[in-house]
Image (cartoon, rainbow, N blue to C red):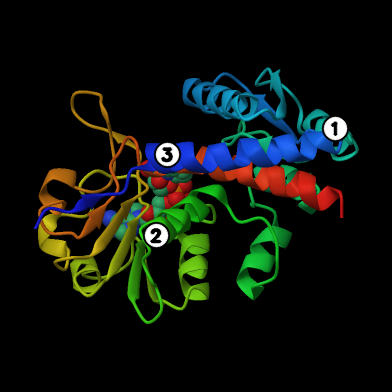
Amino acid sequence: MTAQLIDGNALSRQLRADVAARVKTLAGRGITPGLAVILVGDNPASQVYVRNKVKACEDTGMHSVLETWPATLSEQDLLARVHALNNDPTIHGILVQLPLPAHIDAQRVIEAISPDKDVDGFHVASAGALMTGLPGFWPCTPHGCMKMLEHIGYDLRGKHAVVIGRSNIVGKPMALMLLQANATVTLCHSATKDLAHHTRQADVIVAAVGKRNVLTADMVKPGAVVIDVGMNRNDEGKLCGDVDFDGVKAVAGWITPVPGGVGPMTITMLLVNTLDAAERSQG
Ligand code: NAP
């Protein structure tokens, strides 16, 4: 069997066209959704991420503001910027790019963002809303994975989903979203014994670890859906995921590539969250 590809670029183009249309409708009512992105320091990967986010906003007709600050910015000054943006009516979403310099408490900064503008979905209020099934902003990466499953028409009810990785931004919210869609969920992590024992039973596998070849063909049930969140570099310095793509695609039913899979979907869901925030601000 050769797995069908879930093309994150193609799905993103489709979803971003929907976003652009909704932005136009809002513009007719005099509202332009606005996203503020704060970057502290000069981490090269973060610089690329924030540029891509800001460009994606502009491409869909949204307003965006990129604030770049030196790594020496104090926590107090960063909190003051967040408070100012909380009170800025032209800004509907606030994103503080992580990681932050070591002298800044990232969690304190995230908690300072108004939950109404928490388009990254990292605030405890957003996490609590997801946990309890209340409306709120879902973290963009796992939300993008759910959109991919929805796109291929995959019914999760009663299916066994195995998530590898339990971070607050990917693994844990991913598990909760799959649970909410009525899958039976297993959440694996670095202390999991015999990872392959779990993955071989899975109808859906989401790999969110950050290590190459965490998932190989012998660990996958024929026909399973495999979603690769990982972003790593191979020996040639090329971007690759956590999944041994060439091996696993011969066994799986569906698979996401890296690049061109989950990555573009993450930015797309940020746009969706910002648009939702703007629409909600109108009541
Ligand atoms: P993270 O915070 O480092 O979490 C990694 C998770 O993997 C942890 O829960 C860890 O377990 C688990 N783990 C480590 N080694 C393992 C092993 N051998 N077997 C099973 N589990 C293992 O990373 P993250 O922020 O969730 O990101 C994960 C990956 O996704 C990274 O490559 C990141 O770059 C990528 N990512 C991509 C996007 C995108 O847009 N495509 C967005 C976000 C993240 P413990 O909890 O026990 O330590």
Q: With 277 as the anchor, is 7 left or right in this view?
A: left
Ligand 1 closer than 8 Å to label 3 CB: yes
Give the residue at x 20% y 60%.
Answer: 253
Q: Which residue occupies 75% across, 48% down?
A: 277
Q: Is residue 262 visible?
A: yes
Q: Secondary structure at mark 1?
A: loop
Q: In the shown orientation, is residue 212 left or right of residue 127?
A: left
Question: In the image, residue 128 lies at what x, y percent?
Answer: 68, 67
Which amino acid is tagged 2? Answer: Leu
Q: Earlier in the sequence, mark 3 or mark 1?
A: 1
Q: Crowding near pointer 2: few (<14 within 10 Å), some, many (20+)?
A: some
Q: Is residue 79 visible?
A: no
Circle 1: is it few (<14), some (14-19), or many (20+) Cα within 10 Å? some
Identified at 24% across, 56% down, the residue is 254
Give the Cα distance between marks 3 and 1. Answer: 27 Å
Mark 3 element type? helix
Q: Quadrant of the C terminus?
A: bottom right
For the point 81% across and 48% down, the residue is: 114
Name the residue carrying label 1. 90
Alpha carbon of mark 2 to alpha carbon of mark 3: how far? Answer: 15 Å
Q: Position of residue 226 (x, y in %)?
A: 27, 57
Distance in Å between CA atoms under marks 1 and 2: 34 Å
164 or 282, nearer to the observer:
282
Circle 2 SS class:
helix
Label for residue 12? none
Give the amino acid at mark 3: Gly
Q: Using the image, determine if residue 242 lies above or below residue 163.
A: above
Tell me the tag on residue 263.
3
Q: Earlier in the sequence, mark 2 or mark 3?
A: 2
Q: Position of residue 29 (x, y in %)?
A: 85, 39
Query: Badge 2 is on which residue?
Result: 149
